[in-house]
Image: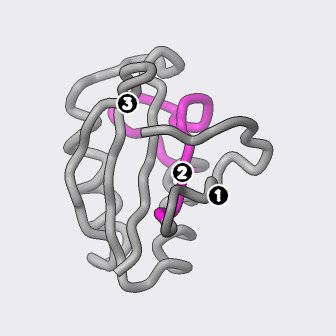
């Protein structure tokens, strides 16, 4: 099973509602036909960004769904594009898949 992390910089969202930590994984599970599963949440130690942990057995389909939601769906009134970074867990770290021009270290 693959792990995915969505890091949301709440300062970049119009309405950083704490319910995002529940609503986003629920929405992704629903829209993906349950191939995306909620695996908890936390906060980044370096910035306090919200971390949404997900898991899946269908990585490519899950990533397609996640990227579609980020691009086209407002979650609790928020455009997630300015504040979202999506990474796939790999042995020894994470590979960022969104945004394409991500620079720097992905830290949780």
Separation (CA) of disc 2 from disc 3: 14 Å
Q: Is residue 41 magenta?
A: no
Main secondary structure type of the part rendered in magenta: loop
Q: Where is residue 12 in the image (x, y as percent from the top left)?
A: 53, 19
> Which of the two marks, 1 or 3, is nearer to us in this view?
3
Residue 97: which numbered mark, if any? 1
Which mark is first along the chain, 1 or 2? 2
| Mark 2 nearby-residue class (10 Å; few <14, some 14–19, many ≥20) | many
Magenta span covers which residues? 72-89
Q: Is residue 79 magenta?
A: yes
Which mark is first along the chain, 3 or 1? 3
The kind of secondary structure element at disc 1 is strand
> Based on the displayed image, in which of its 4 quarters is residue 7 positioned?
top left
The kind of secondary structure element at disc 2 is strand
The kind of secondary structure element at disc 3 is loop
The quadrant of the image that shows the C terminus is top left
**Looking at this view, is 94 or 25 the one in front?**
94
Q: Do the residues labelled 2 and 3 touch (CB within 8 Å)?
A: no
| Left or right of 10 on screen, residue 96 | right
Residue 86: which numbered mark, if any? 2
Q: Do the residues labelled 2 and 1 touch (CB within 8 Å)?
A: yes
Separation (CA) of disc 2 from disc 1: 6 Å
> To which residue does mark 3 refer?
44
| Mark 3 nearby-residue class (10 Å; few <14, some 14–19, many ≥20) | some
Residue found 28% across the figure and 23% down from its top: 17
Residue 88: which numbered mark, if any? none
- Farthest residue, direction right: 101
| Left or right of 92 on screen, residue 76 | left
Residue found 33% across the figure and 33% down from its top: 76
């Amino acid at each position: 099973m693959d792990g995915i992390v969505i890091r949301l910089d709440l300062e970049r969202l119009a309405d950083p509602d704490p319910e995002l930590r529940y609503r986003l994984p629920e929405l992704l599970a629903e829209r993906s036909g349950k191939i995306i599963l909620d695996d908890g949440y936390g906060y980044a130690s370096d910035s306090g960004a919200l971390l949404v942990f997900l898991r899946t057995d269908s990585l490519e389909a899950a990533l397609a769904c996640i990227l579609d939601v980020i691009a086209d769906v407002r979650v609790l009134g928020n455009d997630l594009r300015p504040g979202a970074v999506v990474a796939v867990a790999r042995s020894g770290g994470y590979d960022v898949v969104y945004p394409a021009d991500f620079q720097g270290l992905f830290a949780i």
